């Protein structure tokens, strides 16, 4: 994989005030990202091979 991956912790959420956070999603640990992305790329390659076109016709 030639792309760079993040090496820091991250989350998606919002600040509620009074030092409180509402977390909606916690991202994978930085050390897990490289292998997860590798597996994602393998899965998408398999899906491209096996995919059938979707149409609205019967």
Image: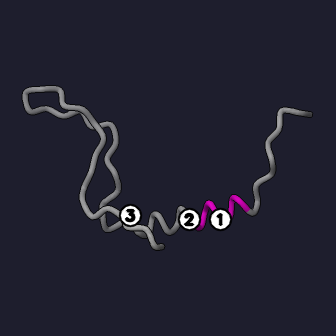
Magenta region: 41-48
Q: Which structural element holds mark 2?
A: helix
Q: Residue furthest top?
A: 17
User: For this view, does 58 lie left or right of residue 18?
Assistant: right
C-alpha gap between disc 3 and disc 1? 18 Å
On the image, the x and y values in percent for residue 50 come to 76, 60
- Looking at the image, residue 8 sits to the left or right of residue 45; the answer is left
In this rendering, is residue 56 above or below 37?
above
Residue 47 location (% of width, % of height): 69, 59
Q: Based on the picture, tell me whether residue 53 belongs to the magenta stretch.
A: no
| Mark-to-mark CA distance, 2 and 1 | 6 Å
Assign a secondary structure to mark 1.
helix
Q: Does the magenta stretch include residue 46?
A: yes
Q: Which of 43 and 55 is in front in this view?
A: 55
- Location of residue 35 by image quarter: bottom left
Name the residue rendered at 8%, 33% in the picture.
Answer: 19
Which residue is disc 1 drawn over?
A: 45
Mark 2 and mark 1 in contact? Answer it, CB < 8 Å: yes
Whichever of callouts 2 and 3 sits on the residue coming sooner in the sequence is 3
Viewer-side residue, 3 vs 54? 3
* Residue of label 2: 41
């Amino acid at each position: 994989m030639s792309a760079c991956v993040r090496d820091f912790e991250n989350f998606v959420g919002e600040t509620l005030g009074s030092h409180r956070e509402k977390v909606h999603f916690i991202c994978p640990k930085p050390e897990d990202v490289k292998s997860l992305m590798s597996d994602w790329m393998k899965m998408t390659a398999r899906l491209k091979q096996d995919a059938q076109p979707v149409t609205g016709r019967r």
